Amino acid sequence: MNPWLATLSDGRVGLRPIRQRDAAQWRAVRNRNYDWLIEWEATSPLGSTDLPPSYSAMVRQLRREARAGHSVPWLITYDGLLVGQVTFGGIALGSIRSAYAGYWIDRELAGQGIVPTALALGVDHCWTALDLHRVEVNIRPENVSSRRVVEKLGFRYEGLRERYLHISGGWRDHLSFALTVDEVPEGLLNRWKSSRAKIS
């Protein structure tokens, strides 16, 4: 099976491939969270011509990239309901074997450990099914919620990338975080669950 077709789960949290028939649910969640997400949305410095104009176009683009081995896009589910998205993109093999991850979630469910669990599931899958060595996450300094996710999972801070991505209409600085597979021999999901167990 292609790695991007995998369905993964841990307890109430799941990852599954993005589909055209998810359009209504995806739009409902995105519309409800528009004000919360728009500040962190990728934009085109050339206008809107090189970004997908619709959900359907976005899914076609993501699936095309996935079939080519460049990305693994998933929807995040909670109790079977669509609540967010995580995508591993920029997949490079050869001597680097790396990818970057991006994610978002319904604001009503933020802070409940859903995104760290989903990200850990995805990272472990990339390390095992794709044999990747490194995963990075780049976050705007102002995005405290997103930074909390990588901090919970123990991603290593690597530094500031100035004017790294065009976000919300301008070139924005990002903080770079990363993990390599040899840093987490027990698996990221196992480490995350162990850390939660110690707190509770």
Image (tube, helix red, strand yellow):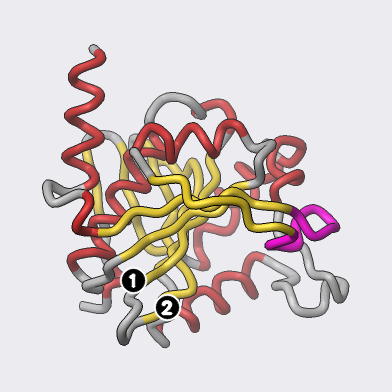
Up-down relation of residue 57 to residue 190 (above or below): below
Query: Does 76 appear in magenta?
Result: no
Percent across and percent down for residue 159 are 55, 51
Badge 2 element: helix
The residue labelled by disc 1 is 4
Q: Report whether 158 appears left or right of 173.
A: left
Amino acid beneath label 1: Trp
Q: In the figure, 2 relative to 180: above or below?
A: below
Residue at left offset 52%, top offset 74%: 62
State if disc 1 and disc 2 touch (CB < 8 Å): yes
Residue placed most toward the observer, 40 or 140: 140
Q: How many marks?
A: 2
Amino acid on which disc 2 is placed: Ala
Residue 5 percent across, percent down from the top left: 31, 70
Per the rendered image, the range of residues in magenta is 163-172
Q: Position of residue 49 (x, y in %)?
A: 82, 78
Marks 2 and 1, the one that precedes in the sequence: 1
> Would you name the residue on which mark 2 appears?
66
